[in-house]
Amino acid sequence: MRFASEGSKLLQGAVIREAAPPGIPSASTAQTQLNGLTVSATGSSSGYSRDLFPHWITISGACNTRETVLARDGTGVVQDSSSCAAISGTWKSPYDGATWTAASDVDIDHMVPLANAWRSGASSWTTARRQAFANDLSAPQLWAVTDNVNQSKSDQSPDQWLPPLTSFHCTYARSWIAVKNKYTLSITSAEKTALQTALNRC
């Protein structure tokens, strides 16, 4: 894993905004939503491709979804006037608490991974709905996080993977539940147990 001191300068003493997408429910609301989710066995991955979820679409001008989230969740972000690429700024990853000053060290994580969504209901969606899911800025679906941490998560559900920072597990569970609820995606029994355990610690 690449540490902040290796790839970019870790700021000391600065107040850095942490990623906080909109739509994170309270623990009580998340509990109600969790109780209403359909529990079923994991669906098939057959036919899955990330290309079936058009992502990083243009949001405004030259800014795509990634650049929009980097600007939203960073502090002092400066973007290239023509490409919209973040050329400077500071980002605090809520998954592990690391702070980065190079956008190349930051991934935009899909809270509910595209492959997980495919296995839990999205395989039957239209391309337009899959695109909306992959670029949803109105739900707690897109998070600016440390790249290596995002890569370790891959397409795993909360029973298989949770962020290294245990203090974030409550928020993670609430966000995961909110996205699954919004898109009427199913959960497995093991997934529900893990989410309930995290909610119980809120």
Image: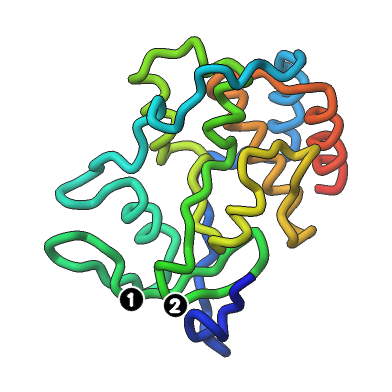
Image vertical order of residue 66 relative to residue 81, above or below: above
- Of residues 74 and 43, the one nearer the viewer is 43
- Of residues 32 and 148, the one nearer the viewer is 148
Instruction: Give the farthest residue toward the front.
Output: 46
Q: Are marks 1 and 2 in contact (CB under 8 Å)?
A: yes
Q: Which amino acid does the dot numbered 1 rest on?
A: Ser
Between discs 1 and 2, the one toward the N terminus: 1
- Of residues 1 and 15, the one nearer the viewer is 1
Tag 2 residue: 101
Q: Are there few (<14), some (14-19), or many (20+) residues within 10 Å of tag 2? A: many
Query: Does residue 141 appear left or right of residue 61 in this picture?
Result: right
Q: Secondary structure at mark 2?
A: loop
Q: Secondary structure at mark 1?
A: strand
Tag 1 residue: 88
Residue 94: image location, x then y, percent: 62, 61
Residue at 38 percent of width and 74 percent of height: 89
